[in-house]
Image: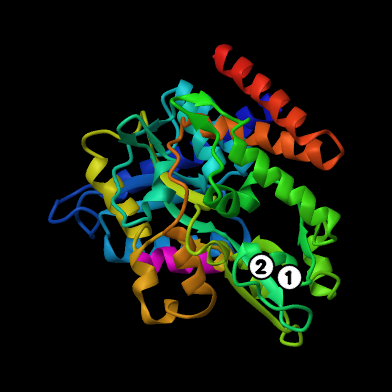
């Protein structure tokens, strides 16, 4: 595996080296303006990304637009699979090489930060605060979000009514199908009812509000109102479930013959609660390639890609949604799914990259799943609390 990555890396470095030499030779002569005939060669900014298919094509078009408008910069795109980008960056930077920019998933960016591959991000954006916080460590921001996806509550109008609140859920007579019993899907409802993971910097998974919420989920199951099935979306499509929670992007695959609607999850909690996003993309700059001379051009490229229009084009191609808050003030974002996404993004749970809650969410998920499989809820949460405390002590 490592040998294969090293071979790929050497191949990429060789191509980049030839490209730079050609550009330098082409730029010899007078220097009226960088990037124009007779002037100095344009500066080469290498951007590693993990966008495939039409999403990658959309990025390519945006990059071409930037180069057309700014001849002083040449952007070299290099596709690298999400699962390989951190290790390849590690190998490249160990030899003083690698790209100036990374555009990849939040998970990959977290790996890159943890291995020291990123420096504080230069580009500016008007992203929602909750989205941005995941890339914040201490007082410094190491990436800017570019696109994301949010969960929505979907309902079938031919099977049951939309409950006005969660308290009315049991009277709606419809089944809610979930792909998994996890915090990501249910954060708005759990947090709106007082659920929490920490208190005074310590785990509190046994908090009474957490127990009450878990007992509520089990009561819904006993009342045949809630089921967990990996095929929950198909159950919804086939009229076997009246409700489901799914990413907003799923709406794009709904056919016209399905009578459906959707609302933000917080509509059922009177606007209370916070959400967790998924499928987030971000952009960041290299810790070893962000030099004083290149910083203005790195910032230029980041700013351009983080513009609302550019975010919109890339997000649409990948069936995601822009992270830009100004995008949702546009006329086309005042109705339908875009409005619901905008409302959801305004209530994203603001968790810094090194937040303790991020480590506790998987532990809570495990407790919920144990209770779902028959473990007494109090015991499941007690075991989770013990595991959380041990994990904290082991740091």
Secondary element under disc 2, as helix, strand or loop, is helix
The residue beneath circle 2 is: 168
Horizontal placement of 284 versus 126: left or right? right
Secondary element under disc 1, as helix, strand or loop, is helix
Q: Residue at x 68, y 61 (%)?
A: 245
Q: Quadrant of the C terminus?
A: top right
Asked if labels 2 and 1 touch by Cβ distance under 8 angstroms, the answer is yes
Place of residue 103 in the rendered image (x, y in percent of width and height, measured from the top left): 47, 47
Place of residue 326 in the rendered image (x, y in percent of width and height, measured from the top left): 33, 67
Horizontal placement of 164 versus 381: left or right? left
The residue beneath circle 1 is: 171
Q: Vertically, is 276 above or below 85?
A: below
Q: Residue furthest bottom?
A: 257
Q: CA distance from mark 1 to mark 2?
A: 6 Å
Q: Quadrant of residue 320?
A: bottom right
Viewer-proximal residue among 100 and 224: 224
Q: Residue at x 45, y 66 (%)?
A: 343
Horizontal placement of 42 versus 117: left or right? left
Q: Vertically, is 357 above or below 75?
A: above
Q: Residue at x 78, y 61 (%)?
A: 177
Which span of residues is magenta-colored? Answer: 308-316
Within-10-Å neighbours for mark 2: few <14, some 14–19, many 20+? few
- Residue 315 can be seen, yes or no: yes
């Amino acid at each position: 595996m490592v040998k294969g990555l090293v071979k790929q890396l050497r191949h990429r470095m060789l191509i980049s080296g030839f490209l730079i030499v050609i550009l330098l030779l082409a730029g010899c002569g007078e220097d009226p303006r960088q990037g124009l005939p007779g002037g100095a060669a344009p500066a080469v900014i290498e951007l590693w990304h993990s966008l495939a298919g039409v999403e990658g094509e959309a990025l390519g078009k945006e990059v071409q637009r930037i180069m057309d408008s700014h001849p002083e910069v040449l952007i070299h795109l290099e596709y690298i699979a999400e699962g390989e980008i951190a290790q390849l960056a590690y190998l490249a930077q160990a030899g003083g090489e690698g790209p100036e920019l990374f555009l990849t998933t939040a998970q990959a960016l977290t790996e890159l930060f943890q291995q020291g591959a990123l420096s504080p991000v230069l580009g500016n954006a008007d992203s929602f605060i909750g989205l941005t916080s995941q890339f914040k460590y201490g007082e410094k921001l190491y990436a800017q979000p570019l696109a994301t996806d949010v969960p929505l509550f979907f309902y079938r109008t031919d099977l049951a009514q939309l409950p006005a609140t969660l308290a009315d859920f049991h009277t709606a007579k419809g089944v809610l199908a979930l792909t998994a019993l996890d915090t990501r899907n249910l954060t708005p409802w759990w947090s709106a009812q007082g659920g929490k993971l920490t208190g005074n910097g310590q785990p509190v998974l046994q908090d009474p509000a957490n127990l009450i919420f878990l007992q509520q989920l089990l009561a819904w199951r006993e009342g045949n109102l809630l089921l967990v099935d990996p095929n929950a979306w198909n159950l919804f499509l086939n009229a076997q479930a009246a409700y489901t929670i799914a990413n907003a992007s799923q709406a794009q695959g709904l056919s016209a013959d399905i009578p459906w609607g959707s609302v933000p999850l917080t509509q059922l909690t009177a606007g209370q609660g916070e959400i967790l996003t998924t499928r987030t993309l971000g952009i960041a700059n290299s810790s070893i390639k962000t030099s004083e001379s290149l910083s203005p051009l790195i910032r230029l490229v980041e700013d351009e890609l983080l513009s609302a229009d550019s975010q919109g084009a890339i997000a649409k191609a990948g069936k995601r949604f822009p992270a830009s808050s100004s995008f949702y003030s546009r006329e086309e974002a005042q109705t339908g799914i875009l409005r619901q996404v905008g409302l959801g993004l305004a209530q994203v749970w603001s968790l810094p990259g090194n937040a303790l809650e991020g480590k506790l969410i998987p532990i809570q998920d495990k407790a919920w799943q144990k209770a779902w499989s028959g473990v007494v809820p109090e015991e499941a949460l007690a075991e989770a609390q013990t595991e959380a405390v041990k994990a904290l002590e082991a740091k």
